[in-house]
Image: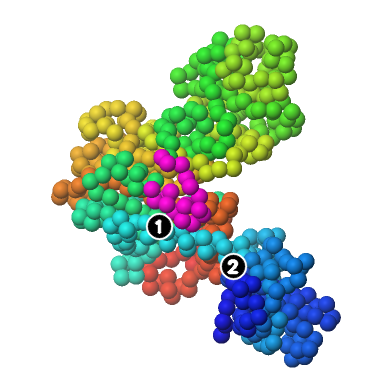
Amino acid sequence: MRSHLCGRVSEALDGQTVTLCGWVDRRRDLGGLVFIGLRDHAGIVQVVVEPDNPEGFAVAETLRNEFCVRITGTVRMRPESQWNADMKTGKVEVVAATLELLNGSAALPLLMTDEDGEEVRLKYRYLDLRRPRMQNNLRLRSKLTSAIRHHLETRDFLDLETPILTRATPEGARDYLVPSRVNAGRFYALPQSPQIFKQLFMMSGMDRYYQIARCFRDEDLRADRQPEFTQLDIEMAFVEEADVQGLAEGLVRQVFAEVLQVELPDPFPRMSWAEAMRRYGSDKPDLRIALELVDVDDLVVDSEFKVFAGPAADPTGRVAALRVPGGAGLSRKQIDELAAHAGKYGAKGLAWIKINDASAGLDGLQSPIAKFLDGETAAGLLERSGAGDGDLLLFGAGPAMTVAAFMGAVRLKVGHDLELVEDRWAPLWVVDFPMFEFDAEDGRYYALHHPFTAPSVADPDRLRAEPADALSRAYDMVLNGAEIGGGSIRIHDPAMQQAAFDVLGIDQTEARARFGFLLEALRYGCPPHGGIAFGIDRIAALMAGEDSIREVIAFPKTTTAGCPLTGAPSTIEAEALGELHIGVVMGGSSE
């Protein structure tokens, strides 16, 4: 139906006849002339319908935005004074000879701009996806997955599928459950990841596996979460951490070069989990923000200010300071807003000091807590933090992990609010994670990653005896403050796997019930193996410069896990529920 794409009409076609198909992006009727911006997936070209073409002119006068048309005409150069540098086709236009209406459009239910609300955009997603921004996002995503496949398949990786209907296994979030019609009272679970199956591939001798897999988690949503998401899964046999990290780093570096023409650092820097938490208050630090936390416990442990002195003397406490360059100019209202932000992450308050004149000692400081400080302590705080005239010091005090959480959040907010984020790509490996985290409320340990992650210790008895000190052989890849990938060397020894289960409070009976097929497979010459998984949605969003992964997913769900386009989730007829041997109970009554 067409000879060329709208966005690829160029000056090289000057004088040639072309046939174009697309949608009316805009229309201007100047009385004697009608100008049409004709759009397809490749871009927009200007079409001119002149009055000496009465048939075409009659059709052009009826056109409205999003009408679908076909145009045949001659390409000609625009006068230089009318060149449009904002369009790839801005030096040319097409003079229409024939104009055919392929399909009209009802009055549009949205503006087809970024001003449209998310609910209406998702309800009419097929219209929203016509916009150049969304077209570009999905094309970028396609290039991303294509580059991934090419890179891995040239390195002997096999693209293998794993089941979607499987059994429920605990992986940190609720499973989506699917009732079985032929097995009354039994349920499948949709996979949160292909974790166990990719390990079984290594036990099967597949050696190098990858899959761009659909994963499902029933959890509260936010900008970077969806109930169904896409993950690049990679697993390799007979490897150690350096092997997996080298492969993954090379993959990401090549993909960015191919898709964005961006050269990432070689090699990526590495940082331990403990160092990341100490310096940045986060295990996914954004290195584009140069601000760092500094510990000042020793300087304030004898302070009269008990808010500082208490946590400083507590082995599980922490007092940390954050220097904000030029922050003395912030108003009290702005500082209160930072305190309110810190409160969302567990802070009971946010102490502060403005440095008006460092040379004047205490007299040069402005702060509600200045009266609790002596000159030596104040001087020590300024020296330790590197603060000087015009700066602001923010302080966090309390349990160490809580301080890390809210001071890390404040660091990010200050960095963005004061435009301190450098314009660059900042990848990072975070390594040496704790194997377990202890929950004081229920008095038990939980796996920081998942229960199949190998510990750094080789002795199962030592793992049982010293779980709080055990580090894991896990690693996360972070980019610009977002975790884009994470993986580990897996446990391949049955005795070590049981030791990990013992620490987690999973006895042999429960372990067999949940993971019996995996534990059985470990008994038959399981090779050492490890891997990594990348969030395709998150990487695509970063590449596209989008804050939300919904902008790079064709048909995403809302924050309430609903689909405005299809109306999912929906009710199911009683007859269909009966075939599945289930009923629905709402508000205490069954339906």
Instruction: Choose top left, top right, bottom left or bottom right for residue 447.
Output: top left
Between marks 1 and 2 in the image, the one whose residue lies nearer the viewer: 1
Q: Residue at x 40, y 66 (%)?
A: 582
Badge number at residue 266: none
- Residue indicated by mark 1: 148
* Residue extent of the magenta highlight: 250-267
In the picture, measured across the screen, residue 139 lies left or right of residue 436, that is: right
Residue 527 horizontal/vertical position (percent): 20, 47
Instruction: Choose top left, top right, bottom left or bottom right for residue 557.
Output: bottom right
- Whether residue 460 is in magenta: the answer is no
Nearest the eye: 220 or 321: 321
- Residue indicated by mark 2: 129
Asked if disc 1 and disc 2 are in contact, CB closer than 8 Å, the reply is no
Q: Residue at x 40, y 57 (%)?
A: 148
Residue 132 horizontal/vertical position (percent): 62, 65
**Mark closest to the chain's N terminus, 1 or 2:** 2
Amino acid at pointer 1: Ile
